[in-house]
Image: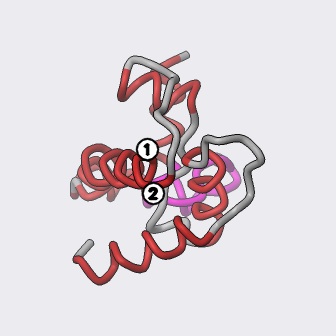
Amino acid sequence: MDDAKWAIVEHVFRGIKIMDSATSIVGHSKVMHHMMPDIVPPIDRRYTLRYLHRSTNIRNGLDREWLAFREIMSGFFVPVASDPKFRAKAEKWVATQDECRWDTSVLKVVDNLLIGAAK
């Protein structure tokens, strides 16, 4: 991700208004994941935030949530998904939808493994 790509992702993140609650990161990431599955991972409180931050709490506010979103992507999802050995294995899982139906993108594979680790 270069600065131009981050700017596009940030523009989309800030342009979405789907949540009635004060917290946006979870809903925004899930919508964006459906829009851009190879760029944005889904983020949730129960698994992602608890695993990465040891808490399900998030400080509300679009500016803070954007920074948290970018940190989660660049500090966890992108490095894991970019590892050549991991990526090769994950792409095989994505290609076998009959066996791995929840693995719809490499970033979703990372998310599914995080959920499995938590369980």
**Residue 105, relative to residue 118: is it above or below?**
below
Q: Position of residue 14 (x, y in %)?
A: 53, 67
Residue nearest the observer in this picture, 31 or 99: 31
- As drawn, the label of residue 106 is 2
Residues 65 and 114: in front is 65
Residue type marked 2? Val
Queried whether the magenta region covers residue 35, the answer comes back as no
Residue at the (42%, 54%) spot, across then down: 63
- Observer-nearest residue: 97 or 3? 3
Could you classify mark 2 by the number of other residues whose Cα lies within 10 Å: few (under 14), some (14-19), or many (20 or more)? many
On the picture, is 46 further left or further right than 62?
right
Per the image, the residue denoted by label 1 is 110
Instruction: Identify whether 55 is placed above or below 44.
Output: above
Instruction: Answer whether labels 1 and 2 touch (C-beta < 8 Å).
Output: yes
Identify the residue at image location x=58%, y=51%. 103
Total marks in image:
2
Is residue 95 in the magenta section?
yes
Which of these two is toward me, 55 or 34? 55
The span shown in magenta is 91-108
Which residue occupies 72% across, 41% down? 21
In the displayed structure image, the side of residue 52 where residue 11 appears, left or right: right
Q: Amino acid at mark 1?
A: Val
Classify mark 2: helix, strand or loop.
Answer: helix
- In the image, residue 33 sits, relative to residue 61, either above or below, namely below
Farthest residue in the bottom direction?
4
